[in-house]
Image (cartoon, rainbow, N blue to C red):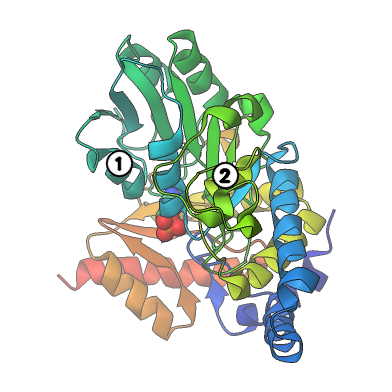
């Protein structure tokens, strides 16, 4: 088991706030700060040759580490600047079954998933409803997959409720009907062990901003190796080609591996920090982080039950990980008041969202929950 106390020293921000918003912006680790300083130093001391001495090797290492996180084979992962961009690439590039135009999306999914296909008039988007507002059972997807369904695109864990979907069941239902399955795992990368082969999804996207503590600007994608040769994104760039430095203009010769999903020059500073966060999490062990977060979220649910506060998160530990959402008529007011008291949480329409960092101590969690419950009550009483 990791030494949580020792690891906490990696995150100076945790000494300033009770941090209950790790699913939005993971705190900067000391080694992330050191990586950003190294980026400036490498750039400043080496100039152009830095591309070959440091930057291209760093990108390769980043793709490999993403492969380690996802249990994906070498050559099946690529870097993107955001999950939205990764989805844009896949929306035009995935080899969807011919003659089908229906895209199935869960109604609790993150908006950018819907936007990708709503912005493409050639697709018909259908949203799978949630009966309880918390979960969507895989059967609800299965029932709506038909001969017109080209793709099921959904998130691994819902950002509004913390419900962890059974991806394998959804992928099996999609495949049985001849459709593909794409998973957005931004809310599980770094807190739920991921094995894209075992999930059997055709594509997967994620990023370093949240549970990987790598800051904005580093996202990534995976495509099933046997599909890669037929992936031909419409939005592309010279770094997606087999040999960018051949400077071939009149032909588009895509790279053989998942690099064909990348585009232009990478925002290197972001990737220094992204890699540092990712390597730290891999060292700690995602399976340990998952258990720690389930313990912390158990306690949040208990405190809410005791206080009679309604939550929108599954009770079953195996169906959640790091997020609990609480009913609130005035979530932004609660968020602002808590910030004044040194507690960072997030608000979403009608809800206060809590996602403790895994180094938050038990006593901090109790104090944080005292304040959360106090401000929730106060915001209600004040009306
Ligand atoms: C599940 C999920 N997908 C996608 C996004 C958006 O990612 P990006 O801003 O990198 O496009 C978020 C952001 O919170 C998210 O929670």
Viewer can see residue 324: no
Image quarter of residue 73: top right
Marked residue nearer the N-terminal end (1 or 2): 1
Q: Nearer the viewer, mark 1 or mark 2?
A: 2
Neighbor class of circle 1 (other Cα within 10 Å; few <14, some 14-19, many 20+) is: many
Counting the numbered discs, the total is 2
As rendered, which of 83 and 347 lies closer to the eye? 83
**Residue 19 against residue 283 in the figure, above or below:** below
Label 1, secondary structure: give it.
helix
Q: Where does the image place residue 381, in percent across and percent down from the top left? A: 21, 69
Q: Label 2, on which residue? A: 260
Classify residue 99 by image quadrant: top left
Residue 146 in view: yes
Q: Name the one closer to the observer, 116 or 302.
A: 116
Look at the image and tell me in which quarter the C terminus lies.
bottom left
3D distance between C-alphas at marks 1 and 2 = 24 Å
Residue 156 is tagged as: none
On the image, which quarter does residue 352 sit in?
A: bottom left
Dot 2, crowdedness within 10 Å: few (<14), some or many (≥20)? many
Eyeballing the image, is 261 above or below 128?
A: below
Q: Which numbered circle lies on residue 114? A: 1
Where residue 55 sits in the image (x, y, percent)? Answer: 71, 69
């Amino acid at each position: 088991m990791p030494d949580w106390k020792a690891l906490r020293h990696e995150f100076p921000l945790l000494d300033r706030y009770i941090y209950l918003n790790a699913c939005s912006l993971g705190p900067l680790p000391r080694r992330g700060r050191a990586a950003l300083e190294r980026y400036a130093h490498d750039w400043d001391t080496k100039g152009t040759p830095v591309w070959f001495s440091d930057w291209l090797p760093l990108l390769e290492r980043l793709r490999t580490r993403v492969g380690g996180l996802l249990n994906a084979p070498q050559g099946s992962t690529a870097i993107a600047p955001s999950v939205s961009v990764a989805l844009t690439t896949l929306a035009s590039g995935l080899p969807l079954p011919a003659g089908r135009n229906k895209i199935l999306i869960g109604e609790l999914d993150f908006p950018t998933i819907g936007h990708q296909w709503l912005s493409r008039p050639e697709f018909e988007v259908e949203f799978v409803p949630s009966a309880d507002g918390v979960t969507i059972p895989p059967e609800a997807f299965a029932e709506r997959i038909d001969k017109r369904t080209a793709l099921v695109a959904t998130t691994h864990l819902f950002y509004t409720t913390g419900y962890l979907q059974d991806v394998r069941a959804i992928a099996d239902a999609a495949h049985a009907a001849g459709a593909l399955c794409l998973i957005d795992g931004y809310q599980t990368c770094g807190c739920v062990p991921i094995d894209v082969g075992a999930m059997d999804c055709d594509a997967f996207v994620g990023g370093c901003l949240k549970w990987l503590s790598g800051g904005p600007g580093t996202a990534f994608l995976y495509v099933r190796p046997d599909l890669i040769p037929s992936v031909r994104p419409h939005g592309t760039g010279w770094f997606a080609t087999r040999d960018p430095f051949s400077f071939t203009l009149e032909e588009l010769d895509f790279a053989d591996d998942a690099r064909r999903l990348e585009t232009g020059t990478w925002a290197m500073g972001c990737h220094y920090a992204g890699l540092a966060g990712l390597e730290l999490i891999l060292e700690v062990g995602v399976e340990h982080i998952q258990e720690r977060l389930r313990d912390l979220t158990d306690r949040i649910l208990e405190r809410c039950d005791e206080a009679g506060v309604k939550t929108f998160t599954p009770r079953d530990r195996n169906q959640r990980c790091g997020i609990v959402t609480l009913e609130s008529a005035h979530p932004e007011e609660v968020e602002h008041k808590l910030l004044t008291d040194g507690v960072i949480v997030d608000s979403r329409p009608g809800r206060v969202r809590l996602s403790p960092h895994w180094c938050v101590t038990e006593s901090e969690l109790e104090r944080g929950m005292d304040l959360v419950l106090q401000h929730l009550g106060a915001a209600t009483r004040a009306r």
